[in-house]
Amino acid sequence: MSAFQGLVKKDFVISKSWFLFWLVFISLFLIVALALDHYILEPLTFLPVAVLLLLFFHAFFLPSMLLSMLRLEGKTQLWLYNPQSSKELLLSKVYVSLVYQVATQLYLTAVGLTIYQFFKSQILIEASDLVAGTIIFNLGLLLFGLYVSCWAMFYWTVYHSLGKFPTIKGWRWLLLLLIFFLYNVIFTLLTRIPGFKEVMNKWTIPVFAGPNFSHKQGSWEIYLNATNIPVLGLLFYVILAVCLFLISCWLLDRKVEV
């Protein structure tokens, strides 16, 4: 077993209880929604909404799982004595969180598709739209979760790096807010540069996204709108996420004490 595999195994062990708790929670959430549908004798009133709500909550499941592992590891100060690089330490946690995210998304997707099979006469959606929408939504959810996770790692390492300076230790949260504010100001100023939006939107990828839902007389109508995703905009967020990850690794290599 390689050193990285050992880190992955350890992270699976320390995080499995949170994963099992989340699985139990979403299962109970779905059971309550199913019971409400049965109680009011109106199928597809609460259950589809419950599935959609849980899927949207999953946009922050990956970074939340990642932060929980970092918090737990922070109590042991492991990286102060671990010979592995900070990149491997963080990648291990990202990998484990991603596996859990994929598993729970597949679970909810399977629940949603099962609902569709039982009630497809009451759910008006084209089969091709259903497949395309399912794939795009799940992929977008994973990418968004990874992007937010990079920001979470960055803020976490910056916060604890600032703890080495007693004069500003009590003001660390304010400095994090300042970083967030400055980033948004800079990004807003960039978008106001003449021609910036035109360049960013010059090359696009057409996809079916942005679903519209309507519930009428016990049935659901679902439509997917055509949306163009700017290639350069997507590339910008990928580069930004990589930079945030590398900065986090560099800060952690300074042997941050938590």
Image: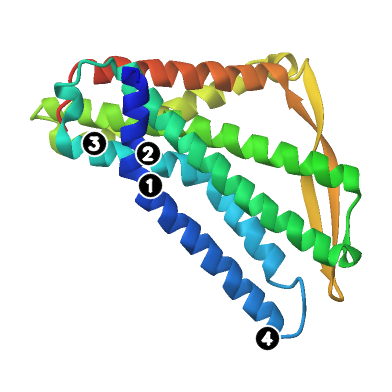
Q: Are marks 1 and 2 in contact (CB under 8 Å)?
A: yes
Label annotation for residue 73:
3
Residue that label 4 marks:
39
For residue 231, what is the image quadrant?
A: top right
Q: Position of residue 141 (x, y in %)?
A: 61, 39
In space, the residues marked 1 and 4 are separated at their CA atoms by 34 Å
In space, the residues marked 1 and 2 are separated at their CA atoms by 6 Å
Would you say residue 33 is visible in this rendering? yes
Query: Which label's residue is closer to the chain start, 4 or 2?
Result: 2
In space, the residues marked 1 and 3 are separated at their CA atoms by 14 Å
User: Residue placed at 57% from the left, 22% from the top?
Assistant: 237
Residue that label 2 marks:
12
Q: Nearer the viewer, mark 1 or mark 4?
A: 1
In space, the residues marked 3 and 4 are separated at their CA atoms by 45 Å
Q: Please name the colour scheme applied to the rendered image.
A: rainbow
User: Residue placed at 65% from the left, 74% from the top?
Assistant: 34
Q: Nearer the viewer, mark 4 or mark 2?
A: 2
Which amino acid lies under the numbered mark 4 shown in the image of this protein? Tyr
